[in-house]
Image: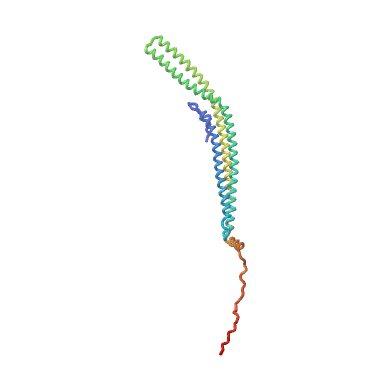
Amino acid sequence: MVMAHFVDSFWGERNSGFDVLYHNMKHGQISTKELADFVRERATIEETYSRSMTKLAKSASNYTQLGTFAPVWDVFKTSTEKLASCHLELVRKLQELIKEVQKYGEEQVKSHKKTKEEVAGTLEAVQSIQTITQALQKSKENYNARCVEQERLKKEGATQREIEKAGVKSKKATDAYKLYVEKYASAKSDFEQKMTETAQKFQDIEETHLKHIKEIIESLSNAVKEIHLQIGQVHEEFINNMANTTVESLIQKFAESKGTGKERPEHLGECSLPAYSLPVSSL
């Protein structure tokens, strides 16, 4: 795909391309600010999520530690704490990125201010050709009208005085028209030269701006990707820990921590009742 060039695309009859390109440059500042706002909002969301996960991890410590299931809460707690840490790390990276965007925004303002001064001559050339174009059009209309009027008088047999008077007006209109044609040619040449240079300048600014913005977005993507990899590792660790937390191991831990002893009651054998003497009945 062939890239379009500003030099080829912003001329037009009203010569308004300069205004379009200048305001497009200024819109770059808005884009930079909005990008900073977007990253800041993302950081806020991540920070809120991290705090919620930390709170959830703490709540796991408050759940009942009774029964064979109790050790599982430690697995949940550890995993949730690590997830909270991952999201907090992303917050830190995003905050660094925000500073980078803000710094770029400040540089952008200075650069645009300098560019405004540099293209002031082009703005004057634009205004000049717009003014001369309007004047040329009016002069052309006046010239045509005077010529038509002179021809009309000749055809209608007007007096020589009227024809000569019309001829004087026609000559003045012709001279004025020629003068504006010359002025227009000079203004057109100046405008085209300055507009060509300025359009290229605006394109260079936009290309640099877009490359910088794309680099920032790439940094954002890499930061998110890195954290997601860490989150994936935490989840994988959780899965492995749960796989290792078998029913047998939970039973074993409960028996070891809560067991009341392995000794059973003493075996005494058969019990015999003591013999008692019965009273002898008197005969």
Residue at the left extreme?
Answer: 156
Figure quadrant of residue 159: top left
Q: In this view, does 53 lie above or below 108?
A: below
Q: Point out residue 135 in the picture as x, y percentages from the top left corner.
A: 47, 20
Residue 249 location (% of width, % of height): 59, 61
**Residue depicted at x 62% and y 68%:** 263
Quick one: 214 or 200, which is closer to the camera?
214
Q: Where is residue 64 in the image (x, y as percent from the top left)?
A: 56, 58
Q: Identify the image quadrant of residue 200.
A: top right
Please tell me which residue lies in front, 142 or 9.
Answer: 142
Question: Which residue appears farthest toward the bottom when viewing the image?
Answer: 283
Seen in the picture, residue 223 relative to 113 is either above or below; the reply is below
Relative to 130, is 54 on the left or the right?
right
Residue at point 37%, 13% (across, down) = 156
**Is 216 placed above or below 64 here?**
above
Question: In the rendered view of the protein, which quadrant contains the C terminus?
Answer: bottom right
Looking at the picture, tell me which residue is in the foreground, 201 or 282: 282
Query: In the picture, residue 243 is in which quadrant?
Result: bottom right
Residue in the foreground of this view, choosing between 191 and 42: 42
Q: Which residue: 56% across, 26% down?
A: 120
Q: Is residue 152 left or right of residue 283?
A: left
Numbered marks: total = 0
Residue 190: x and y, percent?
54, 23
Residue at the extreme top: 160
Instruction: Work out whether 218 lies above or below 250.
Output: above
- In this picture the colour scheme is rainbow
